[in-house]
Image (tube, rainbow, N blue to C red):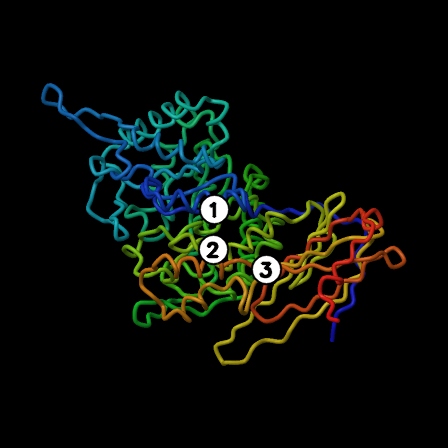
Amino acid sequence: MAREITIPAAGKPFKNNATFCVGSGRLGLALQKEYIDHLKIVQERIHFKYIRGHGLFCDDVGIYRETEEDGKHVAYYNFTYLDRIIDSFLEHDIRPFLELGFMPEKLKSGEQTIFYWKGNTTPPVSYEKWAELVETTLAHLIDRYGAEEVITWPVEVWNEPNIAFWAGTMEEYFKLYEYSAKRERVDPNKVGGPVICGIETEKWLRAFFEHCIENNLPLDFVSRHCYTVGKPVRKGQFIYHEIFSPTYMIEELKETRKIMADYPQIANLPLHITEFNSSYVPVCPVHDTTFQAAYIARILSEAGEYADSYSYWTFSDVFEEYDVPRSAFHGGFGLVALNSIKKPVFHTFEFFANAGKELLYRDENLIVTRDDKRYVIIGWNYHDTRKGEPGPDKEYVLSIPSIGQQAILIKKQVGGNYANPLQTWSNLGKPRTLNKEQRKILMAASEPLQTDVKLFDEKGFYKVKLTIQCNHLYMLEILPVKDFTDTYDGFEPDEFFGLE
């Protein structure tokens, strides 16, 4: 039975931070053409403000080198590739959310690495040389792009030091943070951490906060990561998980805010979720599905109440943590698949990028937002269909305050046969690589179905019926219309189709 809801004329600000930041594969991938092609696609349709990726100090970016002078090893800094990468970002109106890591070959203290591309996870052999690397890099960026620009780029120290991304101890991470974050090095940038994932969260947060407070260390924001799945199970080339409710992440954000609240110096700092997704592995097929689009919509609808940003991991399947991807669809993290094909979840971010600034209504499956003369309604319905049965439809009858005698309702639909290129790829026989015709078919299959109808004021309201099918996502936009029909004399389109 449909839910009948009267939408109020006024609401509250919609804390919508969906486009503040997005994740990236290691920064060295930004030297690839397809990576930049994908960045252009997301910036044309979504307009993220910041981009965050690993590998700033990895050797493929090539910043830290050493030369021998008078029998001594002397640091040499090469910013050729970094300049090229940052220039590309700024050309696409996106700025770096800088992550300091991993360890350059010449500064490593051990051989522990992570990923196919072997990011070194060990503490520096010299913390003084590490600190000089940080300071010199930021000074170069300020010299090249100007302090007024670079001051807006946040600086995050390392990545997930509470698991395999850091071969040192907690205390050694705190030392790395101290050497990285001192004001003479990061000034005028904002700096933060501890960049942990959801393991021993409270232990790490409290210890980190107390260390910063006791040692009077700069801490301008708190950062952590959120993934909403259980332990991985491998099946052939792919990994699957039990997926928790999307409210699992919302509860993690609430708990993080509660811990922060125990420290007056920390309580009101920005909270940045610099990675989030369902699965944390880049070979999990859920990332490519319409389920993912609806599931992530539920997170975006509320996460801004507790976090100042939540950066989807990642914008592109140009990504190589588990080796070079094997096929166009392979369960990669990206909003955009290889060959520049938009995934269903791409449209989740596109829809939220177009949401209104005022939140009039929200429940588990729907938000209604408004700008001055425009409504945007986003609806979603995620459901586990592994048992072969679709979940029930979510039906609404909305009474929405009028913004004019006549309006147009434009509906975009993701799900089923629409904006579901994974299904089309399967129908094509799951080709490993795509020829031009297959790519053309898949790019067309990646776009939502768009339809429209007229709306008329009925006693001060528009009546809108919406049925949200299982694992579907919808965006409805209502715009006022000034009707010029009466100014056209003799315009009768039906006359062209009559038969005698």
Query: Amino acid under label 1?
Result: Ile
Q: Check disc 2 and report its element: helix, strand or loop.
A: strand
Query: In screen coordinates, is 262 left or right of 436?
Result: right
Answer yes or no: is residue 432 visible.
yes
Which is more toward the observer, 137 or 267? 137
| Labels 1, 3: front one | 1
Above or below, 48 against 453 in this view is above
- The circle drawn on residue 41 is 1
| Labels 2, 3: front one | 2
Answer yes or no: is residue 171 visible.
no
Mark 2 vs 3, N-terminal side: 3
Above or below, 200 against 159 in this view is below
**Residue identified by numbered label 3:** 298
Other residues around mark 3 within 10 Å, as few (<14) / some (14–19) / many (≥20): many
The residue that appears at 27% across and 41% down in the rendered structure is: 123
**Residue identified by numbered label 2:** 342
Q: Are marks 2 and 1 in contact (CB under 8 Å)?
A: yes
Above or below, 147 against 220 in this view is above
Above or below, 30 against 140 in this view is below
Label 2 vs label 1: CA separation? Answer: 9 Å
